[in-house]
Image: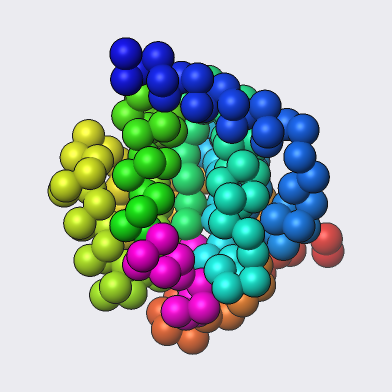
Amino acid sequence: MELVLNNVRYERLLRRARSEDLSEVSGIGCLYQSGVDRLGRPVVVFIGKWFPITEIDLDKALLYLIKLLDPIVRGDYVIAYFHTLASSNNHPPFSWLKESCIYIYNILIFYFYRYKKNLKAFYIVHPTFWTKMMTWWFTTFMAPAIKAKVHTLPGVEYLYSVMARDQLLHGRKQCLYDMTINGLHYFQPDTSNT
């Protein structure tokens, strides 16, 4: 019975996601498909610094997430989350996480097996102590099935072993920050235009 209810809820959310104007969220540019990894799987990028949590309708953000991911999760996919320079202005309030996280998880992950099963890797670039703790808590208590798929990476260059540079579209700030904290040891200028 619970499975049927969550299926109905998801279909209702998907219909809303397809019919509502979500340009407020899509225009921010914090969540998008960025190409494919070296195995041909779509890469979904989320840039935490660009997510203005206090200025955005979180319900519309959820609808946009569903609209973007629904066609992608039908096959294998990966997510790259850039926590670069994110602050408390970019984190959802704990009260929202507490109330909404379980609801979202039940709808998107637990009852829709393809979200969980087809997620092959979740990369967190430039994590903070807070990010690592929240990730540990979530993967230990709420989603232990994806724990082995979550990888925290200290720099952008670690992603280049699993995806080509030209397939990973991210902001210049992530690279500048990365060079500031990790040095220039991995930086290779683009010489294809010369």
Q: Which residues are magenta?
A: 82-96
* Residue drawn at (64%, 44%) of the image: 64
Counting from the top left corner in percent of width and height, residue 79 is at 48, 45
Q: Is residue 73 magenta?
A: no
* Residue drawn at (52%, 78%) of the image: 89
Quarter of the image for residue 21 reads: top right
Residue placed farthest to the left in the image?
140
Look at the image and tell me whether residue 26 can be seen. Answer: yes
Counting from the top left corner in percent of width and height, residue 71 is at 62, 25
Position above or below: 174 against 62: below
* Residue drawn at (27%, 57%) of the image: 135
Q: Nearer the viewer, residue 35 or 15?
A: 15
Q: Quadrant of the N terminus?
A: top left
Look at the image and tell me whether residue 170 can be seen. Answer: no
* Residue drawn at (49%, 33%) of the image: 77
Counting from the top left corner in percent of width and height, residue 30 is at 63, 59
